Image: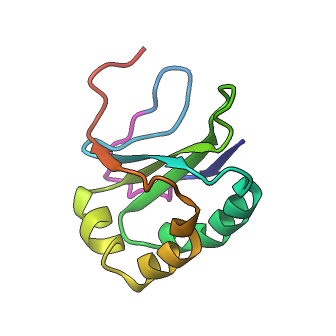
Amino acid sequence: MATTILPRARSATASSSSPPGGGARTLPGMILESATLNVLPGREDEFLAAFAQAKPLIAGRPGFRGLELRRCLDEGLGSRFLLQVRWEQLSDHTEGFRRSAEYERWRELLHHFYAPFPSVEHYGEPVHRA
């Protein structure tokens, strides 16, 4: 199960590219935040309901360009999710969202579902595509 928020409209002066075969459009310099979320077993449905409540909190932030939440398909890992969020700049996440009232509410809704607490990493533009 994947949850996707489509990117917002971009200005006419911003160039965008689409990977071969379609997919998410990215802007040069866009940041990809990635987190593996290990949800407490048996609480996956509760987590997904809370995530649905939390999505608007992040989607309304300046610099937000979209997200995907994917559930792991590997046997025995159905409580693991991959969250990928696209931001215009690193500071849109690390300073803008994380220092906001919306992030405090995000934490209240979601952080008690994780064990262990996820590490969050940020990536730049793709260095190769196929």
**Horizontal and vertical percent position of residue 45:** 76, 57
Q: Nearer the viewer, residue 88 or 55?
A: 55
Q: Magenta stretch?
A: 7-17
Q: Please tell me whether the stretch drawn in magenta is mainly helix, strand or loop.
A: loop
Q: Nearer the viewer, residue 73 or 94?
A: 73
Q: Is residue 9 magenta?
A: yes
Question: Residue at position x 48%, y 73% from top?
Answer: 107
**Horizontal and vertical percent position of residue 79:** 65, 44
Q: Nearer the viewer, residue 39 or 3?
A: 39
The quadrant of the image that shows the N terminus is: top right
Question: Residue at position x 67%, y 68% from top?
Answer: 50
**Figure check: 77 above or below 56:** above
**Horizontal and vertical percent position of residue 74:** 65, 26
Question: Residue at position x 42%, y 72% from top?
Answer: 61
Question: Residue at position x 31%, y 29% from top?
Answer: 126
Q: Residue furthest bottom?
A: 101
* Res 31 visible: no
Asked if residue 59 lies left or right of residue 126, the reply is: right
**Figure check: 19 above or below 117:** above
Asked if residue 125 lies left or right of residue 2, the reply is: left
**Horizontal and vertical percent position of residue 46:** 73, 63
- Residue 130 location, quadrant: top left
| Colour pattern of the rendering | rainbow
**Figure check: 20 above or below 10:** above
